[in-house]
Image (tube, rainbow, N blue to C red):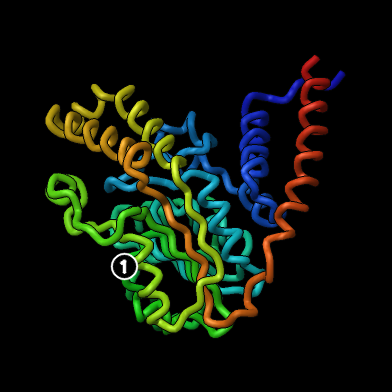
Amino acid sequence: MGEPPSDEKIQRMEFLLTLRRRGISNQAVLRAMDEVPREHFVTPETVDAAYADQALPIACGQTISQPYVVAYMTEQLDVRPEHRVLEVGTGSGYQAAILSRLAREVVSIERYRTLADQARDRLKTLGYDNVEVILGDGLAGVPSRAPFDRIIVTAAAEEVPEALLEQLADDGVMVLHTIGRPEGPNVTNPWIAKYIFPGGYIPALSEVVPAIARSGLLIADIEILRLHYAETLKNWRERFLAHREEAERLYDERFVRMWEFYLAAAEMSFREQAMMVMQIQITKRQDVVPLTRDYIAREETRLRALENSERLSWRLAGE
């Protein structure tokens, strides 16, 4: 009888099975998610939760997106080996690392110097040599490196940046990812604007869609994630409170109380006020992405059968 799989190996297997169960079917994307060591992109305090399907806090008040969101957005991009990709919002560098396994070149732009420097060093150490991290305004793109076959934006506004449209190739695909409000245009909560996200604004779908239409682009797909981010915020708050004393040492009690209140209020906005995460796939031409979603259902059926057989083999290995 062979040795039972290690806890780490089981964690990685369950990580991939969770992605498959939630509908990620592209084999190249799944392979990239398996190859990139997510534990190198999270903070030491959250490394035990690196493969949990939730967002985790990183520096500058930002987060590393939950694995499903990373995989889904990557799948929507339909990246091919010859493609050049622009990523707006480097963060920890995890999404860029995933894209680097699929594309010829990835250019990632980040507005926070701390995050840009950390991601650049991290990606270099891990050997992702086809990724370049640039410090700057992501919504201005990188004109000197255009055109890009694919553009991924993790902070969409109520207007689609003209600069990014100009930098998208004629047969390119752009994916916009943003938190959205359900009730139409509104204003940012004054407390949030003052203490948490100065200058921040959450657009409504009714603002984003007309902006895309005015730009001349075509919407190929829209995915609305409803309660998913409520669970992310719940886990984020629980982990934050588990390190409350450490946070107080780093900042102060006032910050801790304020951040706890924000996380709780944000969670309730998703559970009770219909806040959502929007992921919009847009193109310049109608024939760029697959005609229908039928292939997803077929692939999910095949992967469920594979999942059942893998579960059986794990049980046998551990007996």
x and y, in percent, of residue 169 in the image: 53, 82
Q: Residue at x 42, y 32 (%)?
A: 46
Q: Amino acid at mark 1?
A: Glu
**Nearer-the-camera pick, 227 or 36:** 227
x and y, in percent, of residue 121 in the image: 42, 54
- 204 versus 213 height, above or below: above
**Is residue 132 at least partly visible in the picture?**
no
Q: In the visual, does 258 lie left or right of 183?
A: left
**Nearer-the-camera pick, 161 or 248:** 161
Q: Residue at x 44, y 56 (%)?
A: 278
Q: In the visual, does 308 lie left or right of 240?
A: right
Location of the C terminus by quadrant is top right
- 173 versus 1 height, above or below: below
**Alpha-carbon neighbours of circle 1 within 10 Å: few (<14), some, or many (≥20)?**
many
- 125 versus 103 height, above or below: above
**Is residue 207 at least partly visible in the picture?**
yes
x and y, in percent, of residue 276 in the image: 40, 49
Location of the N terminus by quadrant is top right
x and y, in percent, of residue 104 in the image: 61, 70
Mark 1 lies on residue: 158
Q: Residue at x 30, y 24 (%)?
A: 241
